[in-house]
């Protein structure tokens, strides 16, 4: 994951809030954020491969119908938590490059 991909994901999540979404659309966002599907219970669950502290996310599939607005909002809120975790990690990585003097191309 890099800053450019993360910015694109943030725009896609904002767009998803403004339009009706199907489960497959939100599953694609979850996959792009580093989540993978696991078998747990009745609904497909998505756990983060990168961040153990993030909650497992359920994205219900009900045929080809749009998700209920409240369900969509809840899922997108959790995906935004993933974005925040990635921003923290990328911020830490950039700080390490700054401290070592690398990554600026001045040498």
Image (cartoon, helix red, strand yellow):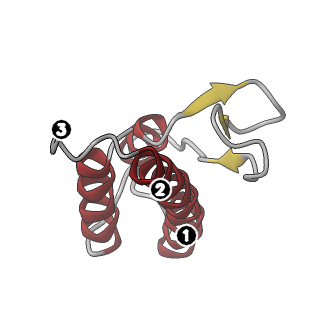
Give the alpha-carbon distance from disc 1 to disc 2, as whole Å: 27 Å
Pointers 3 and 2 in contact (C-beta within 8 Å): no
The residue closer to the viewer here, 72 or 9, is: 9
Identify the residue under disc 2: 95
Q: CA distance from mark 3 to mark 1?
A: 42 Å
Nearest the viewer among 41 and 31 is 31
Q: Which mark is residue 107?
A: 3
Check if mark 1's residue and mark 2's residue have beta carbons within 8 Å: no
Nearer the observer, disc 1 or disc 2? 2
Q: Which residue is mark 1?
A: 77
In the drawing, what numbered circle is on residue 24?
none
For label 2, the SS is helix
Residue 88, given in percent of the width and then of the height, sits at 54, 60
**Mark 1 neighbour density, 10 Å: few (under 14) some (14–19) many (20 or more):** some
x, y percentage for residue 66? 39, 56
Nearer to the camera, 14 or 87: 87
Q: Residue furthest front?
A: 107
Looking at the rendered structure, the number of numbered marks drawn on it comes to 3
- Please name which of the two marks, 3 or 2, marks the residue nearer to the observer: 3
């Amino acid at each position: 994951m890099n800053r450019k991909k993360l910015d694109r994901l943030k725009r896609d999540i904002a767009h998803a809030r403004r339009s009706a979404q199907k489960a497959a659309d939100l599953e694609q966002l979850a996959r792009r954020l580093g989540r993978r599907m696991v078998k747990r219970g009745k609904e497909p669950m998505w756990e983060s491969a990168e961040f153990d502290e993030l909650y497992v996310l359920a994205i219900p599939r009900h045929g080809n119908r749009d998700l209920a607005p409240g369900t969509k909002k809840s899922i997108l809120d959790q995906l935004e938590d993933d974005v925040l975790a990635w921003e923290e990690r990328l911020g830490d990585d950039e700080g390490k490059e700054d401290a070592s003097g690398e990554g600026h191309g001045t040498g």
